[in-house]
Image: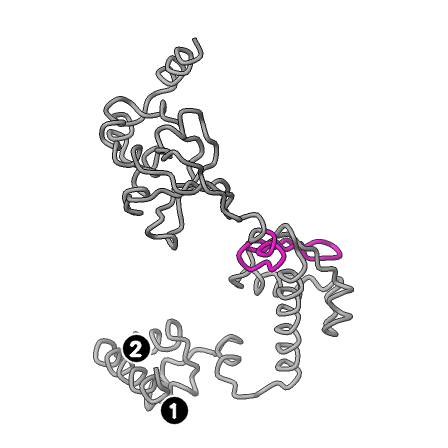
Amino acid sequence: MTEKRMKELFHGALGCISRLESGGRLYKCLHDFVGMSNAEIEEAGYTLQDYYEEDTLKHMAAASSIQYASLEELEQQVKEAVEFIVQEGIGKTDNGKYEIRYKTLEENTGLCIKGQSCLQEILSGMLAERKEVAMVSTGENSFDVTYHPQFCLLMQSKNMRETEKVHVPAPVQRLRDLISSPFLEVCLTSEDDVYVEPTAIPELCIDVLTEVGKKEWADVLDAEVSQVFMGLQGLEVCLTGIDSARLGAFSNVVSGSCPAELYIKWVADTEEIYQARTQRMD
């Protein structure tokens, strides 16, 4: 939105308010709710001096046109400090967590925050807004920052080495055969759509489905397993000839993320699962 357009909208809004309110109510609206100072109300062309109340510090600070060089310098230092923390962390952590000591921060950016609780709080808030940061906690001598794995260079490099795909040997294996025994934390993906982020299933086994469920999801259970490999979220089973949306729906069902009546219909209860596994052991 251009500055010209912003001014047009602002004046249009003031005009609308003026048509709806007048006198003291108009002054209250402009001064207390919009936040205009008395001087700004006059500059906008209103003659409401009879209703004036004393401007608060907030009004005066907002209306001030003074540019503080020292504040701009501090703002630049704080921005550099946040950037240093982010880049240092994502470049060096191999587990998503990284400690940045205040002394290290001062040595690299010149910003001293030791004992400065206000600055620490500001930096913590700015870090929390960064897309790379999952969580930040403020300690006496350091920030403890947790980063999202997808931004951590060492973690990505490690994952690339671990995601070498292992092809399932012939003969053709179906999903129902593969999950005859329980799999923990497994994701189902489609060979035809590898860019869809899969849903992690806490436990996947053929006996978690009722007989009705096995019939309803027969197309998924009969899908051909093309690859089994360690992915970013754990074990991934890649299937061929099945739509990723259908796999997502199946994953939601066995994970319990579906309407209760369908879950009861398709997913076996604990007693049924126990009996099925006991019979298989016998």
- Residue at (28% x, 46% y) in the render: 243
Question: Do labels 1 and 2 touch, CB within 8 Å?
Answer: no
Which region of the structure is painted magenta? 134-158
Q: Is residue 196 magenta?
A: no
Q: Position of residue 158 (x, y in %)?
A: 61, 52
In this view, 128 is above or below 231: below
Q: Quadrant of residue 113?
A: bottom right
Q: Residue furthest top?
A: 282
- Residue at (53% x, 48% y) in the render: 163
Q: Position of residue 14 (x, y in %)?
A: 29, 82
Q: Which is more toward the observer, 172 or 146?
A: 172
Q: Which is more toward the observer, 120 or 281?
A: 281
The type of residue carrying mark 2 is: Leu
- Residue at (31% x, 47% y) in the render: 244
Quadrant occupied by the N terminus: bottom left
In this view, 33 is above or below 219: below
In this view, 218 is above or below 193: above
Q: Which is more toward the observer, 62 or 232?
A: 232
- Residue at (50% x, 42% y) in the render: 234
Determine which residue is flagged by label 1.
Answer: 43
Determine which residue is flagged by label 2.
Answer: 26
The local crowd at label 1, few if under 14, some if 14 to 19, many if 20 or more residues have their Cα within 10 Å, is few
